[in-house]
Every structure is written in C-alpha cells, then in structure tokens.
Amino acid sequence: MSEDPRTQPLDPTPAQLDRAPLAYENPAFLNSADGRLIRILAEYTEPLARFRRERIQDTVVFFGSARFHGREEADRALELLNNTGSVEPAPQHEQPASIPEIAQGTASELGRRRAVAAVEMARYYEDARRLAQMITTWAQTLSQPNPALPALHRFVITSGGGPGIMEAANRGAREAGGKTIGLNIRLPFEQHPNPWITPELNFEFHYFFMRKLWFAYLAKALVVFPGGFGTIDEMFEVLTLVQTHKLAKNITVVVYGSEYWKKVFNFEWLVDTGAISPGDIDLFRFADTPEEAFAVLKEGLMVHHLEPEAQRRPKPPSPEEMLGPEFARTL
C-alpha cells in the first residue's frame, strides 16, 4: 500500500523552476480560444500603426475575380485556378480549350465557353490596370489640405492582395509611381500576395471581418470588376452599408462591366418585387471603359470629399488628421 503523499516531508531544496513566459510571448495562450480577443485587436492595431507610418489617408478599393490574368498570360496557356487565390491549377477538364482543340473539334463545351471567357476576363484585367494608373496619377497631383502637416497619400489603390483583378489594380498603381495596399486573407490552400503591392502595405488577415473593416472604413470609392462569390459578398456588404447610411460618408461605387453584371443580377426585378427601393439602383453606377469609370470616380471624389474639404474653415488639426488614416464615422 502506497503512502499518502500529503504525509511525506517536503523536499527542503526543490528543483529550480524555469521562468514562466510573458503572456504576450506565450504562443500557447495567444493561439488559444482565450487569446482570440488579443488576436482580433492585433488585426486592428497593427494595420493602423502601419497606415499611420506610411501616411495613408484614404483609399479607392478594387474588387474582382482572382482567377484570371493579363493579356500576355491569356495569350499563353492560361489556367483557371483551383480556388480563389490558389496557386494550384484547376482540373484539366475545367481549363479553357486551346486553339488547336477548338480547331480539331476536340474541345468540350465547357472548355469552349471558358476559352471565350478567358479572353474577356483578360480585357477586364487590362482595364483594371489602366484605371488604377489613371486614379493614382491624378491623386498624386492633389494639393494637401494642410501644408503645415507631412503629406498624406490620398485615394490609395487597395485590393484583396491576390492575383487576377486584384493584381491588376496593384500593378497599375505601382506602375504609376504610387503606393498601393494589399489586404490578403490566410486561406487553407496555398496562396501568395501579388508582387505589385507596396511591401510596407502588404497585409495578411486571419479574420475576414477585420479585413472587411479595413476595406470599408478607409474607402472613399469602390470599383467592382467581374468576379464570383467573394466579389459579390464584398460588393453587397459595402452597398448595404451605403444603403443603410451606416457609414457617415459618401462612397462612390462603380460596377464595371455592365453586360457581365446584368447577366448575373436582374436589378430591375429586385425593384419590381419590392426587394429594394427604386432609389437603391442609384447607389452605384455602371461603367464599361477605364475613361468612363475614372470620370465617375473623379466626380464623386471631388463633389463629396475634395470640395467640402477645401471649403472648411482652417482649424487646428486633430490627432487623426496629423497621423492618419481617416476613419469613417458610423451612425
């Protein structure tokens, strides 16, 4: 029969304990359910610190498909991706048909349709690239509202950080000599940020809702290119914030590619059934060329933001104005 340990004498010289880890250096705690609040706060405070360091005031956000590439890649053997943002190709039977397959009559119906779509999506890539160049070039000519403060970067092109339309937006801004932001998301499959993002403004989030916060709260305008579930989710989330006046600012929304989007959604039917109000269709504008989209964006940014800023009486700058970025108030 074993002896009760409580009756045993204590060791007069117990072994030296290792130092306990600091709470903020304890990965077991930080990655646990109890550490979730800290992880959420980190995805707020760390991006905020970087936006302030890089002098970002506000953004123009581009949404669109991750699965398609530029004209030069479309002219080669363009591959559909297995998942949004993935580097893994989709199965062969889902790939666009090649020209020899079409000529020989061996292409499947899906392959033929996707071959046509690949060319169309390549056009949208080039249009997004051109539009981002135009916005960035124009934004760099804007005067600073308070010359006494360090210059803030206005209407910085922002994307989800992945390939496809997102890459095109970052690429166009970078080619125009501007800073450009990528708000990437960590996904179960392998994926990487595109190489055109400004390195200091390359972010990766674990929580979708924190990523969406940064999309919405700094944006003064939104451009929605053709895309799938992710693009649709992001577009209607912002439109809902605008529709409900939850954000105390005007966001100019351009839906790019009217033929594509009118096949995806019958907006008039939503009005006819009473699901949305007739005025809700005025929350966004369609555009089909970079020049048309730029004209809409420039007008909206001038009328709702630049002109009111110029008319305000000079006053001592707030800490937010001194540090940036400019957060939208919520109502």
Image: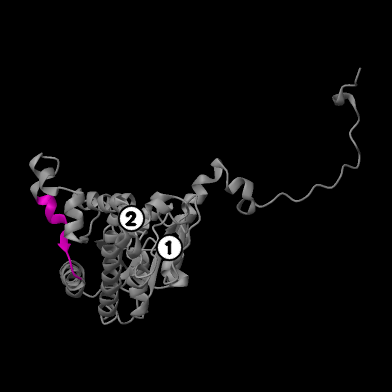
Who's the residue at 39% across and 49% down the image?
209
Q: Secondary structure at mark 1?
A: helix
* Name of the residue lying farthest toward the front: 104
Q: Position of residue 275 (x, y in %)?
A: 14, 40
Q: Position of residue 142 (x, y in %)?
A: 25, 80
Quarter of the rendering occupied by the N terminus: top right
User: Is residue 8 visible in the rendered structure shown here?
Assistant: yes
Viewer-side residue, 66 vs 4: 66
The amino acid pointed to by label 2 is: Ala
Q: Which residue is mark 2?
A: 107
Who's the residue at 49% across and 52% down the image?
189
Q: Which residues are magenta?
A: 279-289
Q: Is residue 233 above or below residue 50?
A: above
Crowding at mark 2 (Cα within 10 Å: few <14, some 14-19, many 20+): some
The amino acid pointed to by label 1 is: Leu
Q: Is residue 282 magenta?
A: yes
Image check: 137 left or right of 16? left
Q: CA distance from mark 1 to mark 2?
A: 50 Å
Q: Check contact, mark 1 vs mark 2: CB within 8 A.
A: no
Image check: 170 left or right of 14? left
Q: Which residue is mark 1?
A: 48
Q: Quadrant of residue 96?
A: bottom left
Q: Earlier in the sequence, mark 1 or mark 2?
A: 1
